[in-house]
Image (cartoon, grey):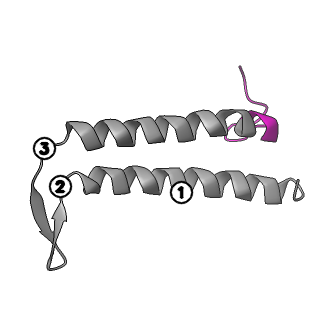
Amino acid sequence: MREAEPGTRKGSELERRYPVALALYAGLAVAAWFTMGEGTVVLFGRPVELRVIPVLILGTFAFRTVMALQADRIRRGGK
């Protein structure tokens, strides 16, 4: 499917891809949680489980996806 202008997509296309993206992020987070070995690292002076780090990274990607959809809705007029 070709885009009208580079870097732009129709709002309905973004809304259609949104649940798929969040489901993939959740699936990757679950896979990372169960495949990472147990262990701890010291982060800012506190011990943190090693498997939490990729889950947090995937969470930031999911948050960015949510914000992108909200920004698109605002640009389109608040629908």
Q: Residue at x 82, y 57 (%)?
A: 75
Residue at which label 2 appears: 50
What residue range appears in magenta? Answer: 1-13
User: For the residue marked with disc 3, what is the amino acid?
Assistant: Gly
**Between tags 2 and 1, which lies in front?**
2
Label 3: which secondary element: loop
User: For the residue marked with disc 2, what is the amino acid?
Assistant: Leu
Residue at which label 3 appears: 37
Mark 3–mark 2 distance (CA, rounded to whole Å) = 7 Å
Q: Residues within 10 Å of mark 2 (few under 14, many from 20)?
A: some
Mark 2 or 1, nearer chain start? 2
Q: Residue at x 71, y 39 (%)?
A: 14
Q: Residues within 10 Å of mark 3 (few under 14, many from 20)?
A: few
Q: Residue 56 occupies which quadrant of the picture?
A: bottom left
Q: How many marks?
A: 3
Label 2: which secondary element: loop
Mark 3 and mark 2 in contact? Answer it, CB < 8 Å.
yes
Please indicate whether residue 25 sits to the left or right of residue 12 in the image: left
Residue at which label 1 appears: 63
Q: Nearer the viewer, residue 77 or 63?
A: 63
User: For the residue marked with disc 1, what is the amino acid?
Assistant: Phe
Mark 3 or 2, nearer chain start? 3
Relative to 45, say whether 42 is above or below. above
Label 1: which secondary element: helix
